[in-house]
Structures are given as structure tokens and as C-alpha cells.
Image: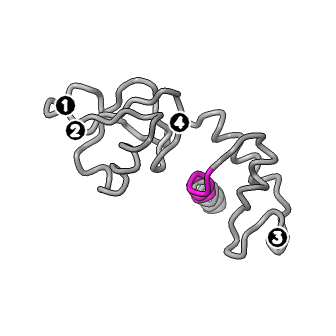
Amino acid sequence: MWVIESKQSGFRRCGIAHPEKATGYPDDHFSDEQLDIIMEEDMLTLSYVDDPEPPLAADPFAEVTAFDKAFYCAIDSLDEDKKNKVDWTKSGVPQVKALEEIMGESISAGLRDTAWKLHEEAIITKATE
């Protein structure tokens, strides 16, 4: 079992808002590439245990953090016209710089992509309810 601890609750990496407390994940939960990313991240501590004592993460997306809410609000405040090159890329995702200006903090393209995917899934879910 893989066990991850975060130095900051809600720190996001590989599509998960990691809690500060040690959280266990099944051996096959992460790809080799994701494990490499987590191992290289200074904000996270990754270890492996044979004995599954730490609790398994029930749903890594269940806890919506204040950062997640701010991200969604920032996306929603962009110009709806996706031809606006200041707010949108050619592929139709939000510009990192536009989100950074709204949120007042630096974000990565990977974090933007994850938040955008979750935002789009939430819109689809609401539309089908």
C-alpha cells in the first residue's frame, strides 16, 4: 500500500487534494508516472507499507477545499466567449495567466487542466440531473 502525507492539507498533485494525515492507497491506484511525480514533490512524502494500517482514502475528490472553490469561481468569471485569447487557449481551456490574475497566486498548467476537467464534469453532471 502506498502512503502519502502532505505538508499542506489540500495540496493537489496527480488529481488528488492530499490531506496532511497519512493516507493509504492501493498498490494499483497510481501509475508509475504518477508515483514518480509524487516522489519528486517536496510537499508530499511517499512511502510504501506491506501492512495496510493507514486508512484507505474513500474518495480523493470528496473534500472540496477552499482552493478548489476559488478555482471554480475563477473559471466561471472568465469571458464566456472562448475566442477571447486573453482568457482561453486555442484548445478551449482557460489561460493559466488569466486564472493566476483572478486567484492571486501561481498555478501550473497541470493543476489548471485537472481543475478544468473537474469543472467540466460538474457542469455535465448538473446538466443531466
Q: Which mark is residue 52?
A: 1
Q: Main secondary structure of the magenta part?
A: helix
**x and y, in percent, of residue 45 in the image:** 37, 32
Residue 93 sits above or below residue 98 on the image: below
User: How far apart, in angstroms, are the residues tagged by discs 3 and 1?
Assistant: 49 Å
In the structure shown, which secondary structural element does the residue marked by tag 3 occupy? loop
Task: Judge from the rendering whether residue 15 lies leftward or rightward of residue 99; answer left or right.
Answer: left
**Do the CB atoms of the residues marked 2 and 1 lie less than 8 Å apart?**
yes
In the structure shown, which secondary structural element does the residue marked by tag 1 occupy? loop
Label 4 sits on residue:
11
- Foreground pick, 54 / 63: 54
Residue 40 sits above or below residue 85 on the image: above
Label 3 sits on residue:
85
Nearer mark to the viewer, of 3 and 1: 3
Q: Which residues are magenta?
A: 108-117
Q: Residue at x 45, y 30 (%)?
A: 6
**Do the CB atoms of the residues marked 3 and 4 lie less than 8 Å apart?**
no
**Sequence-earlier tag: 1 or 4:** 4
Task: Judge from the rendering whether residue 57 lies leftward or rightward of residue 10; answer left or right.
Answer: left
Label 2 sits on residue:
1
Q: Amino acid at mark 2?
A: Met
Residue 44 sits above or below residue 35 on the image: above
**x and y, in percent, of residue 84 in the image:** 85, 70
Q: Residue at x 62, y 62 (%)?
A: 124
